Amino acid sequence: GYGQGEIMVTPLHVTLAYSSLANNGDIMQPRLVTSENSEAKVWKQGAISKDNLPTLINSFTALINDVGATIPDGAVPGFRLAGKTGTAEIKKSQDDTTGTENGWFVSVDPDTSKISLSMIIEDVKDRGHSHVT
């Protein structure tokens, strides 16, 4: 996994967490989609409260879609995506100064819940993290 200090996650974990933005706050069970009729199942119900959901969706869509967006390169014509960049530290301990960093980008289509993805660009230390991803 990748992390910040003691928090370790995989790209799948992050993608699943963001899928809750498109699924009424529920985290969906990961599955391999082999046809259009693939049945979606809820894995963790109510991960995001219905009260907080609109605020989170608006905040994460603004980062990609609004004028002055910080990650306009994340936009895909025809979709209103919600997303966020981030940085994961790769080091042996908190005191390690020789470690590197990976740039993250995670995105979801909150309107149709058909697209949810995350990506990692390795070794972005000192290279403007969010601009690399």
Image (cartoon, helix red, strand yellow):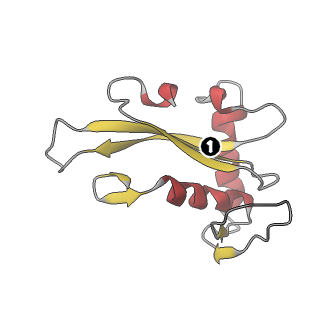
Left or right of 123: which side holds 21?
right
Which residue corresponds to the image point at 63% horizontal and 36% vertical from the top-left? 63
Amino acid type for the residue under numbered disc 1: Gly
Residue 9 horizontal/vertical position (percent): 42, 58
Q: Is residue 97 above or below residue 27?
A: above
Q: Is residue 55 visible?
A: yes
Left or right of 74: which side holds 79?
right
Q: Is residue 40 above or below residue 117?
A: below
Residue 32 horizontal/vertical position (percent): 68, 62
Residue 88 found in image quarter: top left
Which residue corresponds to the image point at 29% horizontal and 59% vertical from the top-left? 6
Which residue position holds label 1? 83
Q: Is residue 45 visible?
A: no
Left or right of 115: which side holds 17?
left
Residue 119 horizontal/vertical position (percent): 54, 42
Q: Is residue 28 above or below residue 133?
A: below
State the SS at label 1: strand
Left or right of 76: which side holds 74?
left
Q: Quadrant of the N terminus?
A: bottom left
Q: Is residue 84 above or below residue 19?
A: above
Which residue corresponds to the image point at 80% horizontal and 31% vertical from the top-left? 77
* Numbered disc total: 1
Residue 111 horizontal/vertical position (percent): 81, 51
Dot 1 alpha-carbon crowd within 10 angstroms: few under 14, some 14 to 19, many 20 or more: many
> Which residue is the extreme one toward the front?
34
> Which residue is the extreme one toward the left?
95
Which residue corresponds to the image point at 68% horizontal and 37% vertical from the top-left? 62
Residue 27 found in image quarter: bottom right
